[in-house]
Image (spheres, helix red, strand yellow):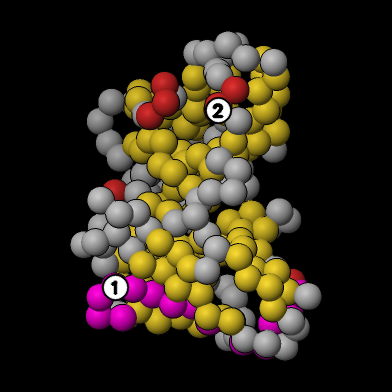
């Protein structure tokens, strides 16, 4: 079966711009979680969506937002980009948290 | 609050030698533990998980981990590593909010 698909794979944006990242989960998975990965901070949880509702949220500013559609596809948006937002953004889907996550390959965002 | 500590940020080991990657957790409730692997330029992949039952858990690629409640540890082991095991390994625990919390990761370097 198809894995978790994240688009685009790479992105370069300028400070102050906004960006939207997309994630298509494994078919049948209704939970989608987003993580930010940086060398200094490691993996940091952004938010989780389940059946179009945000179920959990990490400690990120309001510039980071997300949503989930009825087909479980999810998007995350970052507005007013800062240099520190440069990171690998990972999306993961699951049937349930105890099943473990299946991760996409990530979107590498570079803010210049 | 649940958390995980990976004691080593980097572990060098010779090819075909055994390896142990250490993970300690803190939790006051039921413990669900995971190990994930991240190969270069990829997302994370589930290696194995402990939910209950036998304390020795076998995963993919010849890895295994042992849940030790008295030492609050969940160390990952492989009896003989291969160059293809070069990757970053993450230990993770589920917290009260059903979020997966990841450790900082351990980079495994295989020496020829």
Please name the residue shown 36% across and 38% down the image.
Answer: B49
Task: Tell me where residue A43 appears, x and y as whole percent.
Answer: 58, 56
Q: Where is residue B93 in the image (x, y as percent from the top left)?
A: 44, 48
For the residues labelled 2 and 1, the Cα–Cα distance comes to 33 Å
Q: Give the range drawn in magenta.
A: A69-83
Q: How crowded is mark 2: few (under 14 residues within 10 Å), some or many (20 or more)?
A: some
Q: Measured along the vertical axis of the image, is residue B3 above or below residue B35?
A: below
Q: Which of B18 and A73 is in front in this view?
A: A73
Which labelled disc corresponds to residue B85?
A: 2
Callout 2 secondary element: helix
Displayed quadrant of residue A9: bottom right
Name the magenta segment's main secondary structure.
loop
Kindly state the secondary structure of the residue where label 1 is placed: loop
Q: Does the magenta stretch include residue B87?
A: no
**Residue B12 relative to residue B69: left or right:** right
* Residue A51, percent from left and from top: 26, 75
Residue drawn at the location 47% of the way across and 41% of the way down:
B36
**Does B24 appear above or below A63?**
above
The answer to which image quadrant residue B70 occupies is: top left
Binning the other alpha carbons within 10 Å of mark 1 as few (below 14), some (14 to 19) or many (20 upward) gives many
Q: Can residue B71 be seen in this view?
A: no
């Amino acid at each position: 079966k198809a894995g978790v698909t994240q688009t685009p794979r790479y992105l370069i944006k300028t400070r102050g711009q906004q960006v939207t990242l997309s994630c298509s989960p494994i078919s049948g998975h209704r939970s989608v979680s987003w993580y930010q990965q940086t060398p200094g901070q490691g993996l940091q949880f952004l938010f989780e969506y389940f059946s179009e509702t945000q179920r959990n949220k990490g400690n990120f500013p309001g510039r980071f937002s997300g949503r989930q559609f009825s087909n479980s596809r999810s998007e995350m948006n970052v507005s007013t980009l800062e240099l520190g937002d440069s990171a690998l953004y990972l999306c993961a889907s699951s049937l349930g948290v105890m099943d473990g996550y299946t991760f996409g390959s990530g979107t590498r965002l570079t803010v210049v | 609050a649940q958390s995980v500590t990976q004691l080593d940020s980097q572990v060098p080991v010779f090819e075909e030698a055994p390896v142990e990657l250490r993970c300690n957790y803190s939790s006051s409730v039921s413990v669900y533990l995971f190990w994930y692997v991240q190969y270069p330029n990829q997302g994370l992949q589930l290696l194995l998980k402990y939910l209950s039952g036998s304390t020795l858990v076998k995963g993919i690629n010849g890895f295994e981990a042992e849940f030790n409640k008295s030492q609050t540890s969940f160390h990952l082991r492989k009896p003989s590593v291969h160059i293809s095991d070069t990757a970053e390994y993450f230990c993770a625990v589920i917290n009260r909010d059903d979020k997966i919390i990841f450790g900082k990761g351990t980079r495994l370097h295989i020496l020829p």
